[in-house]
Amino acid sequence: MPDCECFGPFEDALLIEPLRFGDDRGWFEEVWNAARFQSLAGVRTEFVQDNTSRSIAAGTVRGLHFQTPPMAQGKLVRCPRGAIYDVIVDIRHGSPTFGQWAGASLTEENGLQLWVPRGFAHGFATIEAESEIAYKVDNPYSPEHDRGVLWNDPAIGIRWPFDTEAAVLSDKDRNAPKLAELPRLFECKT
């Protein structure tokens, strides 16, 4: 069974290390199994969409993205090619970890996956050129519910592991609002 631990200060976000079985031909890895995910992490979800993105240059930032209710998404993220620094930020008002972030390197070599629950903004930066990210979501993409938080908001203080002055960004991500400018979109249920 894969190994799983709470991610950063968040009890409901998980860093997952799937089991790999290798020999002289290469390796095999099971990246998703609903029953195991539920028994291992206590998370019951039904994924409805798989997404893949590819970034050409190292230092490409995508995020910090989320969808608002009722189209909020939980995501299971991995990096099947290259290397990324994956980040989440708690945007649930009333949460003891509101505004806090955690990050981890997800790489082709380490096979780590990140479970991002609803109520978190998610983003990543490519550490290697030609990196790909693959993720499953439990709600389909909805343009009218698509939002973001500024990737380098000083109030959040993410320590990105590259020269942020050279970041490759979309206009959407460059102009996203700061955390303090967001309305109360998610409330903590604890």
Image: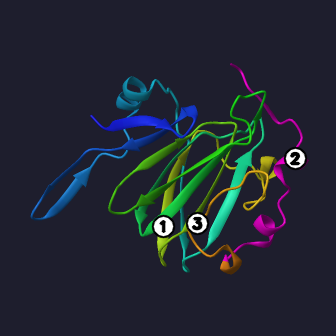
Q: Nearer the viewer, residue 177 or 157?
A: 157
Q: Does residue 92 appear left or right of residue 29 in this picture?
A: right
Q: Does residue 146 appear left or right of residue 89 in this picture?
A: right
Give the residues in magenta: 167-190
Q: Are marks 2 and 1 in contact (CB under 8 Å)?
A: no
Residue 125 is tagged as 3
The residue lying at 20 percent from left, 57 percent from top is 27
Residue 132 is tagged as 1
Classified by dominant secondary structure, the portion drawn in magenta counts as loop
Measure the C-alpha gap from mark 3 to mark 2.
23 Å
- Residue 20, how many percent across, how many down? 23, 49
Residue 183 within the segment the image draws in magenta: yes
The residue lying at 42 percent from left, 26 percent from top is 38
Q: Does residue 164 appear left or right of residue 126 in this picture?
A: right
Q: Secondary structure at mark 1?
A: strand
Q: Secondary structure at mark 3?
A: strand
Q: Residue furthest left?
A: 24
Between discs 1 and 3, the one toward the N terminus: 3
Q: Residue furthest top?
A: 190
Residue 173 within the segment the image draws in magenta: yes
Compared to residue 32, the image places residue 61 above or below, namely below
Between discs 3 and 2, the one toward the N terminus: 3
Crowdedness near tag 1: few (<14), some (14–19) or many (≥20) residues, C-alpha within 10 Å: many
Label 2 sits on what residue type?
Ala
